[in-house]
Image (cartoon, helix red, strand yellow):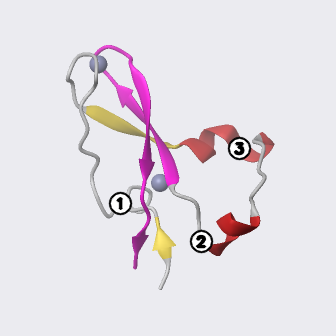
Amino acid sequence: MEYVCPLCNGMTQLHAACSKCGFSLIDGGAVTDYLGPYAPYDLSPEMEQGDPPCTHLLVCTNCGNDSYAIIQNDVI
Ligand SMILES: [Zn+2]
Ligand SMILES: [Zn+2]
């Protein structure tokens, strides 16, 4: 068994609406992709038992509002 982010793996589609205008949000990708190798990365021992949830940037193409969503990993 493996824990993966269903959004990163194309297993599910994002269904979320902008909190400001109600427009459909698009998935801007996993936030770790933006932070890159320079992000502070200090995993506690408890966190090493499983991959941390994937955080995705959600972008509203209508009003430009950005938000984040923590995606729970699915087991495959
Ligand atoms: Zn992801
Ligand atoms: Zn919006």
Q: Is residue 61 magenta?
A: yes
What label does residue 50 carry, if any? 2
Residue 59 lies, with reference to residue 73, above or below; the image says above
Q: Amino acid at mark 1?
A: Gly
* Residue beneath disc 1: 10
What amino acid is at disc 2? Answer: Gly
Secondary element at image label 3: helix
**Nearest-to-viewer mark from 2 and 1:** 2
| Residue at the image point whose x is 74% and y is 58% from the top | 43
Residue farthest left in this picture: 22
Q: Is residue 46 left or right of residue 69?
A: right
Q: Which mark, residue 46?
A: none
Query: Which image quadrant is residue 39 in?
Result: top right
How far separated are the C-alphas under marks 2 and 1?
20 Å
Q: Nearer the viewer, mark 3 or mark 2?
A: 2
Left or right of 58, for residue 19 = left
Q: Mark 3: which amino acid?
A: Gly
- The answer to which of 41 and 6 lies nearer the viewer is 41
Label 2 vs 1, first from the N-terminus: 1
Determine which quarter of the picture holds residue 38: top right
At a point 44% along the width and 64% down the height, the residue shown is: 73
Horizontal side of residue 2 vs 74, given as left or right? right
**Residue stretch in magenta:** 54-76
Dot 3 and dot 2 residues touching (CB under 8 Å): no
Q: Main secondary structure of the magenta part?
A: strand
Q: Which residue is mark 3?
A: 36
Residue 53: x %, y % from top left: 51, 57
Closer to the chain start, of discs 1 and 3, is: 1
Residue 69 in magenta stretch: yes
Judged from the image, the secondary structure of the residue bearing numbered disc 2 is: loop
Disc 2 C-beta below 8 A from ligand 1: no
